[in-house]
């Protein structure tokens, strides 16, 4: 998935190339295999956004399918996309 680079007053931020921003309580999926907060998370793992950081540069995502049950992990904007 390609990202779109936007400039802010302090730094450049990579935003996912989707139609509009991702909002709290939206369903998302992981765009590629990654490690976050000690978990290995596979491509297409679904989750729900429960928090937004730095105007959408990162998201708190609740993922149900993690070992030990649901957990909230912080993922960068380019690591998730909205489930349509």
Image: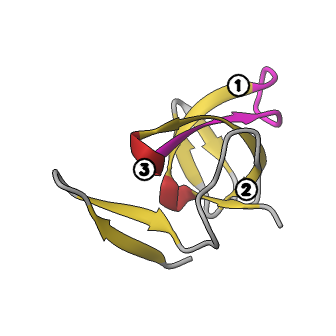
Location of residue 15 (image quadrant):
bottom left
Label 1, residues with CA under 10 Å away: few <14, some 14-19, many ≥20: some
Q: Is residue 66 magenta?
A: yes
- Of badges 3 and 1, nearer the viewer stands 3
Asked if the residue under mark 3 is in contact with the one under mark 2, i.e. CB atoms within 8 Å, the reply is no
| Residue 69, quarter of the rendered image | top right
Give residue 83's position: percent from left, percent from top: 79, 61
Marker disc for residue 57: 3
For marks 2 and 3, give the one nearer the viewer. Answer: 3
Q: How is the image coloured?
A: secondary structure
In the image, residue 22 above or below residue 6: above
Marks 1 and 2: CB-CB under 8 Å? no
Could you tell me which secondary element the residue under label 2 belongs to? Answer: strand
Work out whether 61 lies above or below 5. Answer: above
Residues at circles 3 and 1 in contact by the CB criterion of under 8 Å: no
Residue that badge 1 annotates: 71
Circle 2 Cα neighbour tier, 10 Å, few/some/many (<14 / 14–19 / ≥20): many
Q: Tell me where the magenta segment starts and ends, as one range.
A: 57-70
Q: Using residue 68 as the reference point, say whether residue 15 is left or right of it.
A: left
Dot 2 or dot 3: first in sequence order is 2
Q: Quadrant of residue 12?
A: bottom left
- Measure the alpha-carbon separation of dots 1 and 2: 15 Å
The picture places residue 5, in percent across and down from the top left corner, at: 34, 72
Q: Give the mark nearer the N terminus: 3 vs 1.
A: 3
77 displayed left or right of 46: left
Instruction: Identify the residue shown where x is 38% and y is 64%.
Output: 14
Image point (70%, 54%), residue name: 42
Q: Which numbered disc covers residue 29?
A: 2
């Amino acid at each position: 998935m390609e990202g779109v680079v936007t400039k802010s007053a302090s730094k450049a931020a990579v935003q996912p190339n989707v139609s509009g921003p991702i909002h709290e309580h939206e369903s998302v999926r992981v765009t590629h295999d990654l490690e976050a907060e000690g978990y290995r998370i596979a491509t297409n793992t679904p989750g729900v956004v429960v928090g937004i950081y730095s105007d959408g540069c990162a998201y708190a995502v609740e993922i149900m399918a993690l070992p030990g049950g649901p957990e909230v992990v912080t993922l960068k904007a380019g690591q998730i996309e909205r489930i349509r």
